[in-house]
Image (tube, rainbow, N blue to C red):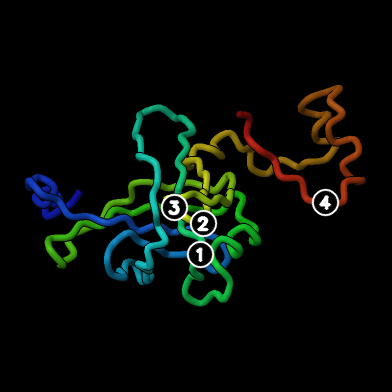
Amino acid sequence: MSPSLVAETSKAVVQYYELVYIGVGDGYYITNAPWDINHGGNNYISAGALMSFDAVQENIGFEITRLSITIGGIAPMPGDSDPFLKKILSLDYIDRPVSIVRAYYNHDSYIDSVLIYSGYINNGTAGVGLQTGAAVRIETSNNWSNFSLVSGRLTNDAKQQSFYPGDRGFEYCKQVQKQVEWKEEA
């Protein structure tokens, strides 16, 4: 943290807003600030879309942590003609990046910012509630979700046999015509 941010966060009253990036389509940039914020060359829209997200938990272990983000789904995002609810669920969103930056302010003057979460989308669901209206809930997991991925490994029967003799998991993979999405164990 910069010295100015350390000084700002030691005050009795600290003003900050979250800047959320959702890497779906051309990318969505939303904030819970009462005004639009330009940060890192991106314009984070304050349209009331960012409704909530779970508390960000830090730990020193290499663990997969999960975080849910709830976004209002009625209004279209800037540049879209469809409501966010329809748009986000119609796009390919699995394993797309998500980041949350906390931007600190002193009244309306920007002080500094800190990346508080970075992860990937696991799931997206739509829902309607009495208090929230229509909303999209995005389930994410942190960067450690791909920690055990082995790069460069071919997914064919011969290569699978060399690592796991007798495993027939890829024996008929040529016959599968659709894309298979691998999920992590629950």
Number of numbered discs: 4
Q: Do the residues labelled 1 and 2 touch (CB within 8 Å)?
A: yes
Q: Which residue is drawn at 87% across and 29% down?
A: 168
Q: Which mark is residue 134?
A: 2
Give amino acid for label 4: Lys
Residues at discs 2 and 3 in contact (Cβ within 8 Å) = yes
Q: Earlier in the sequence, mark 1 or mark 2?
A: 1
Q: How far apart are marks 1 and 2 (CA)?
A: 6 Å
Q: What element carries label 1?
A: loop
Q: Nearer the viewer, residue 106 or 147?
A: 106
Residue under pointer 1: 74
Q: Name the residue under label 4.
A: 178
| Mark 1 vs 3: CB contact within 8 A | no
- The residue wearing badge 3 is 132
**Residue nearer the viewer, 43 or 171:** 43
Disc sitting over residue 149 in the figure: none
Q: Which of 83 and 97 is in front in this view?
A: 83
